[in-house]
Image (cartoon, rainbow, N blue to C red):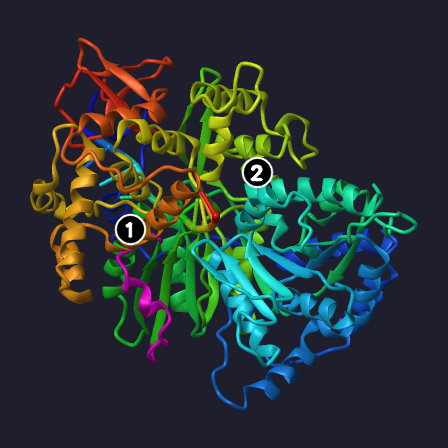
Amino acid sequence: MPSTSKVIRLAGKEKRTTYGDFRAKHAGKKPQVPWVNVSDEEDRLRKTHLKVMVNGQSPHARHTRKNKKARHSVPSIEEPASPVPSSSGGAAALQEQRKHLPIAKGREALIQEILDNDITVLLGETGSGKTTQVPQYILESGLAGKGMIAVTQPRKVAATSLAKRVAAEKNTTVGKLVGYSVRFDECSSTETRIKYMTDGMIVRELLSDPLLSQYSVVIVDEAHERTLRTDLLIANLKNILKERNGSGEANGKGKGKANKLNPLKIVIMSATLDAEKFSRFFYNAKILYVQGRQHPVKIYYSVEGQTDYVDSAMRTFFQIHVDQPPGDVLIFLPGQEDIESLEKAIELFAKQLPKDEMEVLLCPMYAAQAPGQNAKVFTATPTRTRKCILSTNIAETSITIPGVKYVIDTGMCKEKRYLARDTGGGFDTLLTKSITKSSAMQRAGRAGREGMGVCFRLYTEESFEKMALAPEPEIMRCSLTSSILQLKCLNQDLEELDLMDMPDVESITSALKTLWLLDAINSNKELTPLGRQMAFFPLEPVHARAIIASKENGCTREALDIISVLSASSKLFVDITELREQAAEARRMFRHASGDHLTILNAVRAYEEIVAGGGGKHARRDWCRKHFLNERTLLEATEIRNQLRQTCGRLGIDWKVSCGDKEDPVVRCLAYGLAQNSAFLQPDGSYKQTMGQSVVKIHPGSVLAEKKVPAIIYDELVSGTAVA
DNA sequence: GAGCACTGC
């Protein structure tokens, strides 16, 4: 049975604004958007929450805050990912900086609170220094005893760069007192007492050490992001606390318990707005508040709702450009399509500006951009020029751009959602949705990093009030297959776990059905030996199943080559709209009649030959470029493959076993994992799912498109446009 | 003949 990477579920398509539309609409007109000044929105929200906290019996929080208020102009220090100073005289300067962080004044109160309570919720704004300082305070106070302090982060870069930063503050190199642990990169030793790690990493550690006994303090940072892994960690921490401290209370202190286990302290660190929810979850734990260092941002709302946000953004930009003092502009848009569209429009109008106006320098920014393209964003803006950054959510959290004074917020973002089906499996959709309040505040905050800022919201204050407080937690929106399998290994059932938010029954049923079809659990929902093996792999269960099946099919080497590419974070085949024909031609040599997976294998093998040929880094890069292959994907896949080979070794699967050029064994073992993702050809040329009702179509990028093979298996099902 | 927010093991 041939296999394809992607199939499309047929559905309707929404109409989108195109470049042509607004060129016609606005040619020659002076752009104007009506605004009303509301301002101080952030302050109002902040105050509401302060009130709650002060009433919430935390005298220290009040104390801490009062001290903050008394402070003024201090050297700015960025968090979380500020570069490590390299100059030799840096250590003393760093210590000086530390003392001036907003959180420094609250140090004693903070330590006392953590000492008095097993669980503390720390509400800290950006720039407060909480992520770098709190672990050090805990260490210096001796509160951690002999155990380690874990600080979890949702992202790898944050974990590694924070560790480097804190190591520098401790005047040492990373890997000694301060270390980190992320996938593919562990930098710690027996000396390590503070360990920055990704939430995924600590969840993995749970599998081998369910009580996290190495750690005496676990700090969950960025808890408000509510990643799937953070949610699972938090639920487990609650159980671990009962086990280790013998108490179900936030201030149990573990006293009087003849327990051999070292007690655990938990610190939940969150941005504004949702601290109360964490507090409630943890037996009404105390909430401590630390103010950040953020310049005020003046907020304008549009008087009436805007129907076309791309068009409104363009008019707003020129309004700023013509009327406002110098300062760069950052525009938040949902996706690449809108960014390109707005880029063309602004370019066109900028040419019509009078000669004495400032120049406009456009910087589009999105994840799928060609590498190096976004470099100009970080270079200083030339004189008599206004930089205009058109960005997706990437500039909301992941990347900080210097020099931004104005933010234009369209109020929209894209959200990927997994729709589970109780037939098992499900499909992904990518919808343009309204953002949330916390997202709107985050976006506005990007204007106040270096001085007073202004944020123009392309929606009314009324719409803002109607926005959800925070995005729906990830656990509600994605496949639970992998998580349920991991929990089964801990003898836990997701349904019975004390989670902050419980996913839909349908989502759980769907995941259980998938696991059962993969033989990971039996009909009593009990973990099978096969399921336990699958959980060892850092992969989606469907892929883990295929690898295990490769043992009896004698093609483990091939299976690992393919699956490591499938589980890399970006696609192997570069797809640039304008060069599509050329790319297809350049990659023709990899095409395989048995489908996309074998095509991937061909490409990986060809790359291996180039690597073995020893032409060096440049030769490899040129070869990849020539064949429209993403080398980053290949490099990442190589790392993943090494990891998978090790895992195979531990499970007694010999990864060196190869089936040579035979394709049947490869497709057969993939089919073990992807059985649920199979479809049969119908008379009209479309495909019908074997185990679901959806009618699907092979993605036109597939080597199988238009081939009309009788049956297919596929990796991914996306929602797409109807053709018939 | 098509559509790409962001992470993690």
Does the image show residue A448?
Answer: no
Residue A233 painted magenta: no
Q: Quick one: A399 or A361, which is closer to the camera? A: A399
The residue that mark 2 highlights is: A472
Residue A576 at x, y = what percent? 19, 48
Q: Is residue A473 left or right of residue A1?
A: right
The residue that mark 1 highlights is: A633
Q: Which residues are magenta?
A: A367-384
Q: CA distance from mark 1 to mark 2?
A: 30 Å
Q: Quick one: A467 or A458, which is closer to the camera? A: A467
In which quadrant of the rendered image does the C terminus of chain A lie?
Answer: top left
Q: Mark 1 falls on what kind of element?
A: helix
**Residue farthest to the top?**
A683
**Residue farthest to the bottom?**
A89
**Which chain does the numbered disc 1 sit on?**
A
Residue A698 to residue A149: above or below = above
Given the image, on which type of amino acid does mark 1 rest? Answer: Thr
Residue A594 to residue A380: above or below = above
Q: Residue shown at 30%/19% (left/top)?
A: A678
Q: Residue shown at 49%/56% (left/top)?
A: A182
In which quadrant of the rendered image does the N terminus of chain A lie?
Answer: top left
Q: Mark 2 falls on what kind of element?
A: loop
Q: Residue shown at 13%/57% (left/top)?
A: A623
Which circle, 1 or 2, is nearer the viewer?
1
Residue A164 at x, y = what percent? 52, 71
Does the image show residue A662?
Answer: yes
Among the 4 quarters of the image, the one containing residue A208: top right
Residue A385 at x, y = what percent? 33, 75
